[in-house]
């Protein structure tokens, strides 16, 4: 999916900021990475990420109804990619 | 207070102003010092009497007064007080349309504008009603700045305004710097203090830079400064060394909670100065003051009346006040009984630690992060301890997932790398604050935005 590349890069950058601010070394983030507790992020960290992504993309898919379901990094990127 | 009681109280009111104006009629000391004018009390007193005589046809009317930082504005205010008018103090920044619409909303008989600076007095009067009521008895309505929510019209008389002013408490001429907007309660208190003690009032223009304000202070030898902690922090940050050369004798802080690092910085800059912090609100008037140079106030204030005639207690973490200096009522609101006989919640949250009570923030400032309440002051106190940080503002940022999250603006000392200071703030907060309390969004800014009352703006971003 070459079309998705710019979105993925931007999302990964924001992820890395969240990790670093938490004092963690950012792990490798791939489209198939599952976004669950195993990453070391808590719900507040995801909330921070969503606010950061809103600053980057100018929109917040999580403020819409129904709240989108996100399992992997690719799912998350798709939300911003389709709306971009 | 019974209606009869109130009657006698307000009748005293305008006669009181008249007597005060007479008392300075022969005073050769400076009254108002600005970058454009220098007016003596005796000349001002004569201006007041002339204005009073020229405008007797306005006696007893409810009027708007566009309040400018000039001696003329104060002269018109005093003249109208002598004429038993009900003066509504309007911000000079409102613009003609909003001045008119506000005046019409309040059914005012007319609006006066003393005009900008300059030596010539050009008092403009615009009448709005043909046959206005003349039932005012020397009152003043102040439109509060409303650092949270819409501005409120707060109604005082000259008794409630002058009662908290201390008289003759210090020997020697006092020269005060006016740091508050002149049309708000705190600004009026500083003016009344000067009037009743024949001190001089140095009035900077609202657009002046900190450097220009310090030059003005130095030129007029300011000895007393009353300001919000936010204003002081800005003065200290930008003018530290220049401030040291000023002969400041008294420092008064009010309007916001005062933290220990700022008190210490002021004590260090002005070791000989009296350091006082005051608790007062537009609605409740002056409630108490603290002079020991420590943040918060003695818990002993909870068990006796303060010297301002105010009783305090804490209920559910909030400071409640019973005050004799309270305003009469809130204009335009529901009919409320005078608050002087009852306990009024202040919205200020207080924590008692041993023999000391500390302000931890406003109830309305609490930030709700996923159901956890966070006091912005507590977070600011931590950020403030990072070396290189000179000022900070913590506020709420909306979050679709957890409601609100903590955001923080910070100002750094010149020559430092903002990114490096930001990392230090992040580390400090990670060490000392719970995850929900940590600022997630940190932005370096050149200065913290202040409201027109000189306080930090707390609206969510």
Image (cartoon, rainbow, N blue to C red):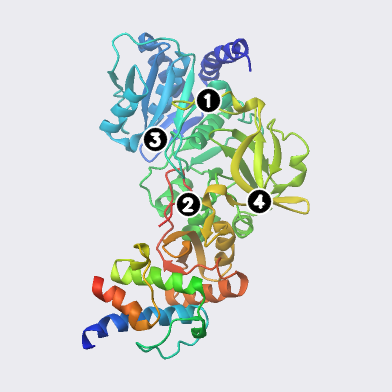
Chain bearing tag 2 is: B
Mark identifier at residue B69: 3
Viewed as shown, does residue B99 lie left or right of B290? left
Horizontal and vertical percent position of residue B260: 64, 57
- Circle 3 Cα neighbour tier, 10 Å, few/some/many (<14 / 14–19 / ≥20): many
Q: Which quadrant of the figure contains the N terminus of chain B?
A: top right
Chain letter behind tag 1: B
CA gap, disc 1 to disc 4?
Answer: 41 Å
For disc 1, the marked residue is B329
Q: Nearer the viewer, mark 4 or mark 2?
A: 2
Q: Are marks 3 and 1 on the same chain?
A: yes
Give how far apart the Cα atoms at labels 2 and 3 are: 22 Å
Q: Chain of mark 3?
A: B
Residue of label 4: B272
Tag 2's secondary structure? Answer: loop
**Residue in view at x 54 percent, y 13 percent:** B15
């Amino acid at each position: 999916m070459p079309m998705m590349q710019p979105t993925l890069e931007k999302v990964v950058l924001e992820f890395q900021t969240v990790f670093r601010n938490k004092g963690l070394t950012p792990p490798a983030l791939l489209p198939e990475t599952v976004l669950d507790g195993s990453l070391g992020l808590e719900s507040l960290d995801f909330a921070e990420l969503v606010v950061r992504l809103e600053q980057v993309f100018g929109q917040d898919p999580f403020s819409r109804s129904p709240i989108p379901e996100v399992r992997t990094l690719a799912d998350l990127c798709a939300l911003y990619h389709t709306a971009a | 207070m019974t209606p009869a009681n109130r009657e006698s109280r307000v009748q005293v009111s305008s006669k009181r102003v008249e007597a005060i104006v007479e008392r300075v009629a022969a005073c050769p000391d400076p009254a108002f010092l600005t970058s454009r004018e220098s007016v003596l009390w005796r000349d001002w007193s004569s201006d007041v009497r002339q204005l009073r005589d020229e405008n007797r046809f306005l006696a007893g009317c409810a009027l708007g007064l566009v309040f400018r930082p000039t001696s003329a504005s104060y002269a018109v205010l005093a003249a109208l007080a002598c004429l038993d008018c009900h003066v509504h103090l309007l911000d000079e920044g409102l613009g003609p349309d909003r001045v008119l619409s506000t005046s019409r909303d309040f059914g005012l008989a007319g609006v006066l504008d003393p005009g900008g600076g300059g030596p010539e007095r050009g008092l403009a009067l615009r009448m709005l009603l043909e046959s206005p009521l003349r039932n005012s008895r020397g009152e003043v309505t102040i439109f509060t700045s409303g650092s949270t929510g819409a501005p409120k019209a707060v109604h005082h008389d000259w008794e409630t305004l002058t009662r908290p002013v201390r008289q003759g408490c210090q020997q020697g001429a006092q020269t005060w710097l006016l740091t508050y907007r002149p049309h708000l309660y705190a600004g009026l208190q500083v003016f009344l203090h000067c009037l009743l003690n024949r001190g001089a009032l140095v009035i900077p223009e609202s657009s002046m830079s900190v450097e220009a304000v310090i030059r003005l202070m130095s030129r007029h030898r300011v000895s007393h400064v009353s300001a919000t902690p936010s204003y002081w922090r800005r003065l200290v940050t930008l003018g530290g060394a220049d401030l040291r050369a000023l002969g400041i004798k008294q420092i008064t802080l009010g309007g916001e909670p005062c933290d220990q690092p700022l008190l210490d910085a002021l004590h260090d800059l002005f070791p000989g100065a009296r350091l006082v912090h005051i608790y007062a609100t537009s609605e409740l008037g002056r409630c108490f003051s603290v002079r020991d140079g420590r943040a918060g106030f003695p818990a002993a204030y909870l068990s006796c009346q303060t010297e301002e005639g105010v009783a305090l207690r804490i209920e559910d973490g909030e400071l409640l006040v019973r005050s004799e200096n309270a305003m009469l009522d809130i204009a335009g609101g529901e009919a409320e009984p005078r608050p002087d006989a009852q306990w009024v919640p202040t919205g200020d949250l207080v924590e008692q630690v041993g023999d000391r009570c500390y302000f931890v923030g406003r109830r309305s400032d609490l930030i709700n992060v996923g159901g956890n309440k966070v006091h912005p002051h507590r977070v600011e106190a931590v950020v403030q301890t990072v070396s290189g940080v000179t000022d900070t503002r913590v506020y709420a940022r909306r979050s679709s997932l957890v409601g609100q999250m903590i955001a923080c603006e910070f100002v750094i000392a010149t020559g430092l790398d903002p990114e490096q200071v930001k990392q230090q703030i992040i580390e400090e907060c990670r060490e000392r604050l719970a995850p929900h309390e940590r600022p997630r969004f940190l932005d370096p800014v050149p200065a913290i935005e202040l409201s027109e009352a000189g306080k930090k703006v707390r609206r969510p971003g």
